[in-house]
Amino acid sequence: MVQPVLDTDELVLRYAVPDRDVPHLRVNFIASLDGAATHEGLSGGLNNAADKQVFDTLRMLSDAVLLGAGTLRQEGYGAMTLEPAAVAWRTARRLPAHPTLAIVSARLDLDPESPVFTQAPSRPLVLTHAGAPPWRRRALAAVADVVACGRDAVDPARAVAELTRRGLHQVLCEGGPHLLGTLIAADLVDELCLTLSPVLEGGRAGRISAGGAQATRAMRLAHVLTAGDMLMLRYLRDR
């Protein structure tokens, strides 16, 4: 068993929201010191055990994990399942054993036979738009709830509202950059958890947000955690 780098109880206190019934959209990313969001195409190349511990804590605290279909494919996501200790923590608080996976996909280019769907502990959500290919929608409807959130493009506000309507108030977005860009443009981001990895990456790696209309959103620093030279930052948007 891997020993935790940071104190688990302190992490829960640091990242828990005051009221779980109030809708809250948190995003979690990692970046190099020079702004690269990936190393050799994957975000996992930048992290360490402490960042992974924060990553796992944020999932444990969430009702839903939201991500774009491209990130799901690129990062090799499997079924949205938590470790036994996290399941025990959730069930002791009368929460579902695992968060619900919510995938944003305009083209529905998803494999219904993927473990993301076939091994899911609860039925995933696929958030798309009314103009998505109907044959793909029918195939995915066998393994997920497919919801149109817009006429010819996914409306991020409608997508988040759909999660709220289902009682999934605490939402963790894990990417990717284009999804984050649209969430920023729509002013839907309540919190950014950003890990700064102590490396200079160079190259052509993109940053954590891309696309979407240009928008400036002021954030307030809530805390800074350190693990060696790694920084875990938490920023909140004052409403």
Image (cartoon, helix red, strand yellow):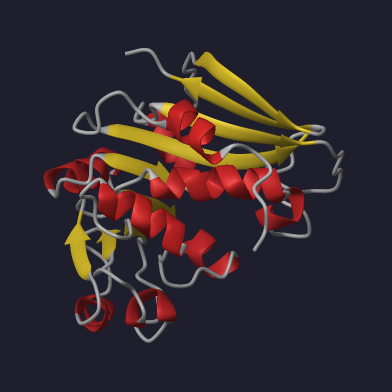
What percent of the width, then of the height, locates residue 113? Answer: 37, 87
Which image quadrant: the N terminus?
bottom right
153 or 161: which is nearer to us?
A: 161
Query: Is any atom of residue 153 visible in this view?
Result: no
What percent of the width, then of the height, locates residue 72? Answer: 49, 64
Query: Is any atom of residue 170 visible in this view?
Result: yes
Residue 182 image-quadrant placement: top left
Q: Residue at x 29, y 48 (%)?
A: 63
Residue 36 image-quadrant placement: top right
62 or 144: which is nearer to us?
A: 62
Which image quadrant: the C terminus?
top left
What residue occupies the far bottom of the structure in this picture? 113
130 or 186: which is nearer to us?
A: 186
Q: Is residue 66 left or right of residue 52?
A: left
Q: Residue at x 54, y 40 (%)?
A: 8
What residue occupies the far left of the structure in this picture? 165
What percent of the width, then of the height, locates residue 28? Answer: 52, 40
Q: Residue at x 47, y 38 (%)?
A: 27
Q: Is residue 114 above or below residue 80?
A: below
Residue 144 image-quadrant placement: bottom left
Q: How many marks?
A: 0
Q: Is residue 156 left or right of residue 207?
A: left
Q: Residue at x 36, y 50 (%)?
A: 89
52 or 91: which is nearer to us?
A: 91
Q: Is residue 132 above or below residue 199?
A: below
